[in-house]
Structure formats: C-alpha cells, structure tokens
Amino acid sequence: MSKKKVVVALGHDALGSNTSAQLNAVKRTAKALADLVEANYQLTITHSNGHQVSMIHKAMTELHRVYSDYTPAPMCVCSAMSQGYVGYDIQNSLKSELLSRGISVPVSTILTQVTVDPYDEAFYAPQKAIGRYMPKEDADIEINKGNSVLETPDGFRRVVAAPQPIDIVEIDAIRTLSNADQVVIACGGGGIPVIEQQHALKGASAVIEKDCIAGKLATDLKADELLILTSVDYVYLNFEKDNQEPLKTLTVADAKHYIVEGHFGETDMLPKIMAAISYLEAVPNGKVIITSLNKTAAAIDAKIGTIITT
C-alpha cells in the first residue's frame, strides 16, 4: 500500500520557548511524529519559530550593544539561524525515536527560502512584533534606522511585515526527498523571506506566517493531508465562551461562513483556517485535520480533531 503524504505543521507547544524547554518539548513531539511514520505516512514537517527567532534577534542585538564591532543580525539571518537550530533538535529527536521503534528512515532538514513581493501591502503596515521590549531611547534609534516600532504597556517593540509567500525556492529538493520516502523538515518559521533581484535573492526584513506556508507547502507537494497540530483538540465556535462548540467536521464553505461571522481569532485560529482553505481549493481531494499535539494518534483514527474537506 502506498504511503499517504502529509504535511505536518507544528505550533509553539511542540517546541518550547528556550533552549532547555525546546529540547524537552521535541522529545514529546518526536513521539507524535513517529506515530505518524509508524502509521505509514510520509512526513514533511514545518514548524513555528516565534520564540526562537525572537531569542536569536535579542541575543544578536544585545551583542552589538555590548561589543560595537559586532553588527546586529538582520531578520532574514535570524530566521535562517532559527531554522537550523529548531530543525537540528527535531531531526535528532525524531531519528532517535524512530530507531528506538526499529524504524530506519532518513530525516533531513532543508534550509528553506520563500520569495515575497517587495510591494506586498504588509510592508506598508508592519504588525508582527519581534525581539525585546525597549525603552523609548532605544526605540528612537530603531526608528531613525528606518525600522517600525510599536508601543505597548510593557515598552516598545520592533515590528516587521508578514507578507504572503510566492514561491518556495527549495521546493524541488523537498519534493525529491519526499518522493524518496524520507522525512523532511522544511519551511521552518514560514521560511526565510527573500526578494528576487535579477539573478540574486536578497533577504527581506519580514516574517512569513507559519500556517500560511504550511498550506502552500501542502499544495505544492499535492499532499494527501495537512495536519495542523496546535494547543486545542478542535476548532471551536464561540471559543472560550459558555456556549463553546467543537466542530468535528467542516467544509470550505462552512469555514468561509464562520470567518465572516468572526468566530476565529485573527492571530491564532484564523491563519490555520485560511491555510486549510487555500490548500483544499488547490487540492480538492485533500483533507485537513486540526487538533492538539498530544492527540495526534487519535486524530489518525479520526477519533478526535476537526476534519476539514471541500
């Protein structure tokens, strides 16, 4: 029996928020991913990097503050660092878990770039907060450098654009490894945003929404399923209200209707639903499952989670 191809999108809960927490978290995550491999799925894995890229950005900025000879790292470089760092932990933990089950499957991490449009409207209204909280004098320095800053009750934070992805630059390499039945970790943190300039790629001061790139990756690979692992067991109507209602099944039409009614949070569930819609409209025979990381095994057997189809 041929294997089903599934793109797995890992959220913040799968990774932790610092180096030690991440190392512990990915051991638990590796068990859930190994369950999928054992159930005869071919995996392509993407993941969030919010905590990790912020940590790296803070560290590089502080290094420059203490040692002026060191230049602060641009966002594209911080994104690349986070891809390697997170991929390294997932790759090693998953490989170890698979071997403990007697499964020998190659696991590879691909440093992945994603092209964006320099005229994307997001660049004119940056909203994605990154890095440390700053006092006003540091915020003024950022503004004078041409960076955008947001004032919050806890201080000032730099904000960057979150443009829509156009093309996954390394998609042929990802597809080749996927077709060879290898486990692939790619497009971490949404991918490294780059802008095409003639024959060169230039890093962009931006981040790409991780759920958005998961939908794009599943579409490009023509995956059988997109599995989005998050912090809740289901997609809910009236989330966290007295009349909260879990949705066990959902169609694209239903999802669009609920979006209009404002049921999905703009920074949490809405990006996941939008990713599901974009994938299913491109791959009508596909299936999307949204559930929590610790319910992965049950979701495989359709015992839990929200299933979205056309």
Image (cartoon, grey):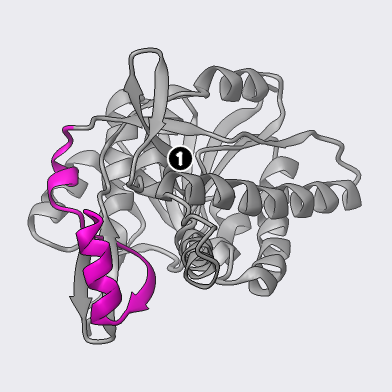
Q: Quadrant of residue 165?
A: top left
80 over 243 or under it: above or below: above
Horizontal side of 87 relative to 258 (left or right) equals right
Question: Which residue extends farthest front?
Answer: 69
276 over 62 or under it: above or below: above
Kindly give the residue lying farthest to the left in the view shown. 260
Tell me the amino acid under the disc marked 1: Gly
Of the pair 54 and 3, the residue shown nearer to us? 54
Residue at 60 percent across and 20 percent down: it is 173
Q: Residue 257, how many percent across, how many down?
A: 12, 49
Q: Would residue 141 be counted in the magenta stretch?
A: yes
Residue 266 appearing in the image? no
Pick the front one: 57 or 255? 57
- Name the quadrant of the C terminus: top left
Dot 1: element: loop
- 286 left or right of 145 in image: right
Specify whether residue 169 is in view. yes
Q: Residue at x 91, y 44 (%)?
A: 102
Q: Residue furthest top?
A: 199
What range is drawn magenta here?
Answer: 119-147
How far across and down, in percent of the image, does residue 93 sit? 77, 55
Q: Is residue 129 a member of the stretch shown in magenta?
A: yes
Q: Position of residue 292 (x, y in %)?
A: 50, 63
The residue that label 1 is drawn on is 191
